[in-house]
Image (spheres, rainbow, N blue to C red):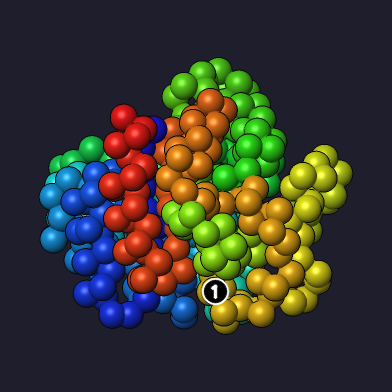
Amino acid sequence: MRIGVSFKPMAPASEIVRMARLAEANGIGNVWIGESPILWQELYSTLASIGCQTTSIHLGTFVTNPAIRDLTLTASAVATVNDISEGRVEFGIGTGDSALRMMGRSPVRVSELESAITFLKALWSGEAREHNGKTVQLKWIDRPRPAIWVAGMGPRVLHLAGRIADGVILSPADPSVLEWCLASVREGAESVGRPMDDIKVLCTAAVCIDRDIRAARDHVRWFPAVVANHVADVIRHGGGGGVPESVKAYLLPPGIYDWQRHGRKDATHNAYIEDELVDRACLIGPPEAIVTKLHELSAIGVDQVVAQTADWEDAEHAITALGIDVIPRLS
């Protein structure tokens, strides 16, 4: 199993570069950077900085969306960082969450996501495509295209991932939720004759490695609240039919989610999250408990687990603990 970390690019930028270097030194394979330009610093500047100051760790978008910028700019930015980092970029994309909502916009349709992925895949492969009535082509690209990961929870997005993506980004680290999600990925793959082995599975969850379970829960309670927002979207756009109770359990009361405190430990909406959901959704506890849960996730098909944290202090602790106490036990 591959271990990654995900950061919200909060100021100062020097701190996120330091964390990426620390992750690389501790045997972590991927660093993924979030995109929400009103809340955090700019994605591709951050990735380029990391790419210049690391040598082996893979860099990824976690995640962008088709509406945040013109697709030709996304294609050029990703290809440029891929060149700077000598081919270490991976590309995570979804329908959009806080990045668009904070701009007063809504997530894009699944059909728009599919069109965007097809377009970007072609440009990164050196092909010419029509765009706004013009033929466009990135003739300067000379590296293999980045792997494309689709993030989502709803059946239609996951069916799309199974059909056309290199990998799928899922959350939380709750086997009952993951198995429900993977069923849609599998259906998508089967519809076009792809084996599931062709599709990498990434699971992301907040992590706190601490023998004091009560303290660990308080550090990660924000994460199931973020998951609750995704579950609400699935039900809003796809109806409640077919969504199991294990998934609906993450729902928060309507209207309490504070987008200004998205992914923050101090968000008031975190108080609505029960301990049982924290334990199901996150990776918390002593190292041996983390390793046990990672093996459970591997058994249901997860190839990479990405640790999320709320701030730099938590990030430094998690990276060091993963490198010293968890990754050696996995290998």
Kindly identify the residue that appears in the image at 34 percent across and 67 percent down: 43
Q: Position of residue 35 (x, y in %)?
A: 43, 66
Kindly identify the residue that appears in the image at 80 percent across and 42 percent down: 244
Identity of the residue furthest to the front in this view: 212
Return the residue nearer the eye: 164 or 149. Answer: 149
SS for callout 1: loop
Return the residue nearer the eye: 164 or 290. Answer: 290
Establish if 301 lies above or below 131. Answer: above
Q: Is residue 159 left or right of residue 126?
A: right
* Residue 32 appears in the picture as rendered: no
Establish if 294 lies above or below 13. Answer: above
Kindly identify the residue that appears in the image at 43 percent across and 33 percent down: 303
Q: Position of residue 29 (x, y in %)?
A: 28, 44
Return the residue nearer the eye: 177 or 27. Answer: 27
Establish if 154 lies above or below 314. Answer: above
Q: Is residue 271 left or right of residue 311?
A: right
Which quarter of the rendering shows the N terminus?
top left
**For the residue carrying disc 1, how many other residues have a C-alpha within 10 Å: few (<14), some (14-19), or many (20+)?**
some
Kindly identify the residue that appears in the image at 86 percent across and 44 percent down: 241
Q: How many marks?
A: 1
Q: Position of residue 115 (x, y in %)?
A: 52, 47
The amino acid at mark 1 is Lys
Q: Report which residue position mark 1 lands on.
A: 265
Q: Toward which corner of the image does residue 261 lie, by quadrant?
A: bottom right
